[in-house]
Amino acid sequence: MVRVVVIGGGAAGASAAARARRLDPNAEVILIERGSMITHAPCGMPYAIGGIVKSHEELQTYTPEEFEKERNIKVLIRTEVVDIDTDKKTVTVRRGGAQETIIWDKLVIATGAKPLVPRIAGVELKGILTMRHPDDVPTIKGHLEKAKTVAVVGGGYIGVEMAEVLLELGKKVLLFEQFDQVLPGALDADVAALVAEEMRAKGVELHLGEKVVEFRGAEHVNKVVTEKGEYQVDEVVLAVGVRPDVDLAVRAGAKLGETGAVYVNEYMETTVPDVYAAGDVAEKVHRVTGRRVWIPLAPTANKEGQVAGGNAVRGRVLKFPGVVGTAVTKFYNLYIARTGLSEKEANALGLKAQSALIKARTKAHYMPGAETVHVKLIAEESTGRLLGGQIVGKSPVVAAYADILAVAVQSGYAVSDLFFSDIGYMPDTAPVWHPLIVAARVLSRGKL
């Protein structure tokens, strides 16, 4: 009987444990989580902080007790792995003040990512908040409760989402981003400008192209200092990104890749025999470029967990083919989606790109409730191969557009393939000329 130990109870870890159990009912599967909950959703934290989700405890699919009972998986919560011995095949854990050793045949490391804390003077002051685990929600809510002015440092996904939450809580919100646009890692400048316009309209004080250089205060932060000025604040939310939590993987002897995440092959195997890595801790391969990338997203983590868990008990039965980086967020009712490469990324990689940004409607012009949607497509100039796209609009249908485009990009579609795609139509769901089809036609430069 094989014993599989999984470290980390988030998306990848829980998925790995469940898949191992499904493929081998006789395996002994142990899931170790240092927090109080498993199958948790850190991406839901802003909504729990804002009260849209009533309790942070709702940010889990299964309680540890349910998972243990229904899946026949031993779950150890509030348990920290302090050492890994790959020669003896053991992990040492600390639980309730005591240490114990657990033997494994196969090990899956799914420790995820942790907030990136920049080296800024004063960053250790009280009142500077980071978000990592749903367990942190009550503490963050307590800090924000009496604050009147809150600075958000970082204009990525979490920064944009938290800006909305804070506005809804009645706070004055200052958002600082060192690059000259919001969502710099996701969008091109022309699309990001549409998002910034909406954020300003809702009341966010945007400080783009303004790098934070210091936090000041006695014990508690009360001032943000940038290259351009000083600003009084009551609390600070750090949202400058995350980095892979590789400490345990390194201790196990696993090689790190060029991105700083754990190097894995298509079977989610690390460079250490019988040790797998999955989720935000691991590198991925980009399906457009073939390059190694690190794109931490929950849907990817779930799939990688399936591959790691299945292969841990059955050998190389599953492969993970890679990612195209499809992601969706929103600011109030403005939905923002992207997939594949941005024009900026494509050109930086030497892929001479051309693009088209079009404005369309989500329904036929005579139907009520239509919203404006902006679609940007990027293609390789020499071949017409689709490289990526970005969509912004005040309708959840934006996410569906991105999903269609993601399949097209990962399938190697050319612009003409997208144009001739048999996308459905009825007046209340799309114009007869679907916005994606229109964008492809415009990008064809008169060829279609």
Image (cartoon, rainbow, N blue to C red):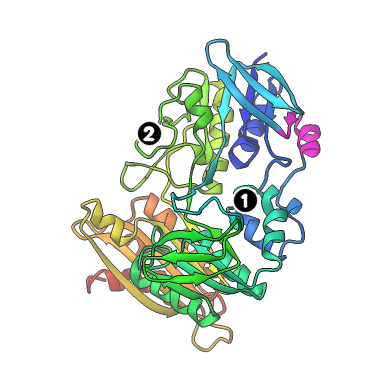
What residue is disc 1 on?
A: 42
Where does the image place residue 95, in percent across and percent down from the top left? 73, 27
Image-quadrant location for residue 237: bottom right
Q: What amino acid is at disc 1? A: Pro
Where does the image place residue 338, in percent across and percent down from the top left? 43, 61
- Mark identifier at residue 257: 2
Q: Residue at x 67, y 72 (%)?
A: 169
Quick one: label 1, few (<14), some, or many (20+) residues within 10 Å? many
Q: Quadrant of the C terminus?
A: bottom left
Indicate which disc, 2 or 1, sits on the residue closer to the N terminus: 1
Is 88 above or below relative to 17?
above
Element type where label 1 sits in the image: helix
Is 411 above or below relative to 308?
below
Quick one: label 2, few (<14), some, or many (20+) residues within 10 Å? some
Element type where label 2 sits in the image: loop
The segment highlighted magenta reads: 64-78
Horizontally, residue 342 falls left or right of residue 31, namely: left
Q: What amino acid is at disc 2? A: Gly
Q: CA distance from mark 2 to mark 1?
A: 25 Å
Where does the image place residue 410, in percent across and percent down from the top left? 39, 50
Q: Residue at x 41, y 50 (%)?
A: 324
Q: Residue most toward the front?
A: 218
Is residue 355 shown in magenta?
no
Q: Residue at x 31, y 46 (%)?
A: 289
Image-quadrant location for residue 173: bottom right
Where does the image place residue 251, in percent across and percent down from the top left? 50, 24
- Mark identifier at residue 423: none
Q: Nearer the viewer, residue 161 or 170?
A: 170
Q: Residue most toward the top?
A: 88
